[in-house]
Amino acid sequence: MYFVGIGVMLLIFVGQIMLHGRLNWMASPKIEKLLLVIEKEEEALELILKRLEELHVSVLAFEMDRQEEEMTLALTLQAKGGFALEKLISVLGSDKLVKKIKME
């Protein structure tokens, strides 16, 4: 009986460690809304979509409004559960074409 008790205690202990740890493979995907104001250039939209693809971020919904000198993009994005949104903001913010970023 002692061996069964010790075995169950170890099983519970290991289970608690696993469930309280950071399990990125169990995290649900994040869905975020992103508003971008970018300069109106020929390859600007393609460049933004390429950057999102490099970061393994999927575009679920897309809305674009063209004005004379700039374009406004409203994107609904899906990223993996362990993805750091700060990385997305820093990558897009470092681009010269991006004038404004708003995350909702």
Image (spheres, helix red, strand yellow):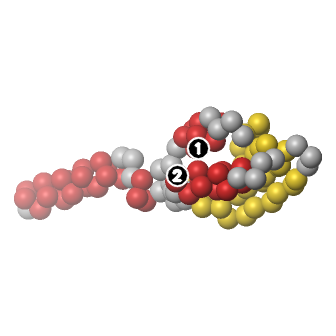
Distance Cα–Cα, label 2 vs label 1:
8 Å
Is residue 65 visible in the rendered image? The answer is yes
The answer to whether 104 appears left or right of 81 in the picture is: right
Dot 2: element = loop
Dot 1: element = helix
Residue 73, numbered label = none
Query: Which residue sits at x=75%, y=53%?
Result: 42
> Residue 46: image x %, image y %?
67, 56
Is residue 30 visible in the rendered image? The answer is no
Quadrant for residue 53, please give it: bottom right
Going by the numbered disc 2, the residue's amino acid type is Leu
> Residue 82: image x %, image y %?
47, 50
In this rendering, the answer to whether 21 lies above or below 3 is above
Query: Which residue sits at x=68%, y=36%?
Result: 96
CB contact under 8 Å: marks 2 and 1: yes
- Residue farthest to the bottom? 60
Query: Which residue sits at x=77%, y=48%?
Result: 41
| Residue bearing the label numbered 1 | 88
The answer to whether 54 appears left or right of 19 in the picture is: right
Residue 55, numbered label = 2
